Amino acid sequence: MARTEPTAAVDEAERDGLARTTGATTKTTKAGKDDLAGLEAGLDALDSVDTGRVPFSRTFREKILPPLTAVLVVLVVWQALVSFKIVDDPTKLPAPSAVWDEVQTAWLKGELLGYIWTSVSRGLLGFLFALVIGTPLGLLVARVKFVRAAIGPILSGLQSLPSVAWVPPAVLWLGLNNSMMYAVILLGAVPSIANGLVSGVDQVPPLFLRAGRTLGATGLRGLWHVVLPASLPGYLAGLKQGWAFSWRSLMAAEIIASSPDLGVGLGQLLENGRNASSMPMVFLAILLILIVGIVIDLLIFSPLERRVLRSRGLLVRN
């Protein structure tokens, strides 16, 4: 009986220790499960894509209202400069109403849309030609070391060359016709598109290329399924810059080279306003050139950029 009580006490202590150990283990396991659940929830939140439509009120407040406010501020400042005689010479700064009268006159004559369409059709067609030439050229320069060493510096030099420098030789080579316009656009846009694609290919992670080769994506299949999709952000930046060069090259060609056979585009309208000393016509041409550039970016390049960024999880909708 003397040994029974200590043994019972020891057994009770062991049971208490086991209970505490079991409780601690249970708590640790529960905490681990909570942490794992939190981690899974976070990963699910990162992987989830919000496909719901954004309310128009939010779109108007965040996307439409800020540029409208900026335009309104510019118009108010412009009108104030004229009204308070800060710039009292209409040959230097016409009133907004005078420019609006010029818009109405061109519209009533049925010429306004013609000015815009002449330049936009040339610009878009020339850009498509530049896209067809610049894309394979960029891939060739990016993937072949000898071609990069031979042509890469030339493309960089051509990209920095002002587009207006190509107008006189293009006129002498091809004459005053649309072919001359397209040649100037190509010489201005192709280097930007090719260099943008080269930059995008250079930024493709080597792991992607090795994984593609492991899965059998080599040669043209590797270019189509691995290289081009992975280089899209840089390629898209090159396309945007290529369009900017196309549009500026076209305006330079239309300002310098004028002929009745070419019609009247926005650049020619700008030159006509200068020859007639009509500042309202000059401002009208400048505003139309600016508006066309903004509209093309909003309708074509901005949606493409958002789609590419969203597909890579880089566009976060707050």
Image: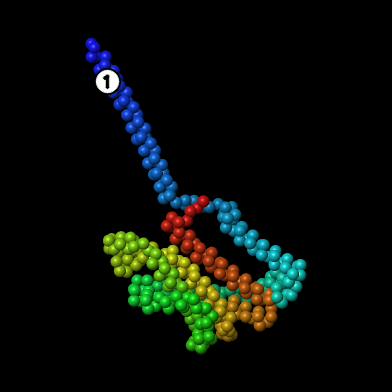
In the depicted structure, whether residue 11 falls above or below residue 247:
above
What amino acid type is highlighted by mark number 1? Asp
In the depicted structure, whether residue 107 falls above or below residue 20:
below
Q: Is residue 231 left or right of residue 179?
A: left
Q: Residue at x 66, y 65 (%)?
A: 74
As drawn, the residue found furthest toward the top would be 1
Q: Position of residue 258 (x, y in %)?
A: 58, 84
Q: Residue at x 36, y 34 (%)?
A: 28
In the depicted structure, whether residue 88 falls above or below residue 309:
below
Secondary structure state at the residue bearing disc 1: helix
Viewer-nearest residue: 192 or 6: 6
Q: Position of residue 20 (x, y in %)?
A: 34, 27
Crowdedness near tag 1: few (<14), some (14–19) or many (≥20) residues, C-alpha within 10 Å:
few
Q: Position of residue 14 (x, y in %)?
A: 28, 23
Q: Position of residue 251 (x, y in %)?
A: 56, 77
In the depicted structure, whether residue 271 falls above or below residue 289:
below
The answer to whether residue 290 shows anywhere in this view is: yes
Quadrant position of residue 154: bottom left
Q: Residue at x 51, y 51 (%)?
A: 318
Viewer-nearest residue: 158 or 177: 158
Residue receiving disc 1: 11
Q: How many marks?
A: 1
Viewer-nearest residue: 124 or 242: 242
Q: Residue at x 74, y 69 (%)?
A: 86
Quadrant position of residue 116: bottom right
The quadrant the N terminus occupies is top left
Q: How is the image coloured?
A: rainbow
The answer to whether residue 263 shows anywhere in this view is: no
